[in-house]
Image (tube, helix red, strand yellow):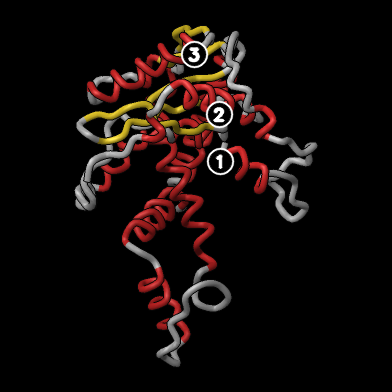
Amino acid sequence: MDCAITLNAIAGYDSRDSTSLNLPSTDFTAGLTGDIKGVRIGIPREYFVEGMEPGVRSAVETAIKELEGLGASVEPVSLPTTEYALACYYIIAPSECSANLARYDGVKFGYSYQDTPDMWKAMETTRQLGFGPEVKRRIMLGTYALSAGYYDAYYLKAQQVRTLIRQDFDRVFEQVDALVTPTSPVVAFPLGEKMADPLQMYLIDVCTLPINIAGLPAMSVPCGFSEGLPVGMQLIGPHLSEERLLNMAYAYEQATEWHKARPGI
């Protein structure tokens, strides 16, 4: 309910945003009937991979059975390009990061280091002090991918793969109304544990990045615990299916108590 209320407030057309759609407004709370009888749910086999924590797999599979018990039908599906999504994302996103953050030079936007009369020194120090380690890492990766001689080999190729990933989802959504996957193959790791190994930290996103690449709506719903920590079930739908996803999440929450559970501290 809270998500639907929030989406009511933030959804809608913005004439100054070229990415927003000029569509009639929707009251997302009105669609929270809790009735999901007849909804066709696909379970992508590529999201239940080796290396997933057994507790996460068990919790999500139990949640899928709960949705089936509420009247939804469940069938296996395949998204074969899923394995390329992580590499694709970490070329496209840093490239866009590099291009978009170039404007933060201390002149018009954001933090500005002014303790020097030298313009170039001020610009360099602004970017040195104004960005954290992860942002700098992504800027460097993106700048490399967009550089002469590497643009076609990396960025252009990643955009082509992105199209294939989107086509995979389009094909599957001709068969089913929504997909259910784990939100993450593992539960939350201790604070700071992955900071020394960014690659391991990036791998945690393996279940969510394909959705970002395809530009689809998705949401995470608490569905259990593993090793004393919460597990998320991810609901994914085709474009403009937010109302259906919210109702699926609402139906599941009405049938279970996991959204009220808290891990021990």
Label whose residue precedes the other's in the sequence (2 or 1) = 1
Measuring from the top left, give residue 57's x and y in whole percent: 29, 20
Q: Amino acid at mark 2?
A: Thr
Q: Nearer the viewer, residue 109 or 2?
A: 2
Q: Classify 10 Å Cα crowding around label 1: few (below 14), some (14-19), many (20 and above).
A: few
Where on the picture, by quarter, is residue 204? top left
Please report contact status of discs 3 and 1: CB closer than 8 Å, yes or no.
Answer: no
Q: Secondary structure at mark 2?
A: helix
Label disc, if present, on residue 2 of the rendered structure: 1
Measuring from the top left, give residue 79's x and y in whole percent: 46, 18
Label disc, if present, on residue 163 of the rendered structure: 2
> Real-space Cα distance between discs 3 and 1?
26 Å
Q: Secondary structure at mark 3?
A: strand
In the picture of the structure, the residue carrying the numbered disc 3 is: 42
Q: Nearer the viewer, residue 197 or 251?
A: 251
Q: Is residue 66 at all visible to an observer of this figure? A: yes
What residue is shown at x 51% (from left), y 39% (from top)?
156
Measuring from the top left, give residue 98's x and y in whole percent: 47, 57
Q: Amino acid at mark 1?
A: Asp
Label whose residue precedes the other's in the sequence (2 or 3) = 3
Q: Is residue 74 above or below residue 107?
A: above
Q: Secondary structure at mark 1?
A: helix
